[in-house]
Image: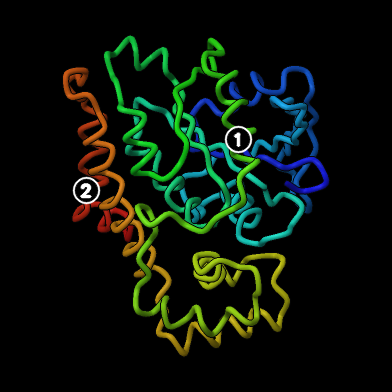
Amino acid sequence: MPEQEPKIALIGNPNSGKTSIFNQLTGLQQKVGNFPGVTVDKKTGTLELPGGIRAELIDLPGAYSFYPTSKDEKLVVQSLVQPGNDNYPDAIVYIADVTKLEKHLLLFSQLKDLGIPVLLALNMADVAEQEGLQYDLDKLSQKLGAPTLLLSGRSGEGMTQLKTMLAALLAQPASGPVDSTQYRLSPEEAKLIPQLQDKFPGYTPYQLVLLAHHVKWLPFLSPLQKEQIEEAISNSGFQDLQLQVYETMQRYDQFTPIVQQARDKDGDQSASFTDRLDDLLTNRFFGPVVFLA
């Protein structure tokens, strides 16, 4: 563990209940500032963990993926793509709405490829119980490669267990991506990465891929670094939009069967109209068409 207080990032999709969990974990030990260079609020708090561990909890803005469409999402990308920056965490708590789990796992699967220890916290446990929705948590944890628990930001259920699991997570050395969820690089990405590894030591292969995707706007890149990345892009035939679609489809292909196999079918209820519409729009064939449009 680091000598200074470890940093834990709280990350999740918008409307995942992340703010309620942040409030439950930090109580009155919170402060609000701004992320450097922008007016977006930066909420931090002190987290007391078992064993006398004090940690800094950073509530990062809500995001859907590492392909941002808003200022908030860009902050999440730039905080996590550059090892060693002020907001780079020692561990991540990923908050997902358990009632919409498949729709919340794209960003989680991307986080797994950063090599940062990740804990998967399934929020809305009280709503899931009302709906009769159940998951095999052991199966989810094993297949997704992350400690997993149920909790509720409304009632406080699971917060003690979350703290215990976080203390154990921080005690473990950081490891690389887990095989069961690791993104399989495209030929273009595989060709790009060796050209950048020496120039960006300490970066994981997926972080190097993200540098190529976001070279035009990442604020910490120097003119020389941008030139080096753009040269690697040209040499490898890297196509930004095409590879975003490729990655998104592949990740859904990986985690969708895992979620379906871990779900208690007896607890399923008939899907709502919006759920059926979401299934259509995130279909592996129709989804990329909508994404491109």
Q: Secondary structure at mark 2?
A: loop
**In the image, which is nearer the foreground, mark 2 or mark 1?**
1
The residue furthest right is: 4
Residue on which disc 2 sits: 283
Residue on which disc 1 sits: 168
Quarter that holds the C terminus: bottom left
- Horizontally, residue 225 falls left or right of residue 140, namely right
Q: Is residue 44 above or below residue 64?
A: above
Q: Position of residue 166 (x, y in %)?
A: 61, 33
- Mark 2 closeness class: few <14, some 14–19, many ≥20 residues within 10 Å: some
Q: How is the image coloured?
A: rainbow
- Horizontally, residue 236 falls left or right of residue 210, namely left
Q: Position of residue 201 (x, y in %)?
A: 66, 74
Q: Is residue 174 above or below residue 103?
A: below
Task: Using the image as rendered, state which of residue 201 and residue 232 is in the foreground.
Answer: 201
**Which numbered marker is on residue 84?**
none
Q: In 3D space, how far apart are the residues under numbered discs 2 and 1 (Cα atoms)?
A: 37 Å
Label 2 close to label 1 by CB (< 8 Å): no
Task: Using the image as rendered, state which of residue 37 and residue 82 is in the foreground.
Answer: 82
**Mark 2: which amino acid?**
Asn
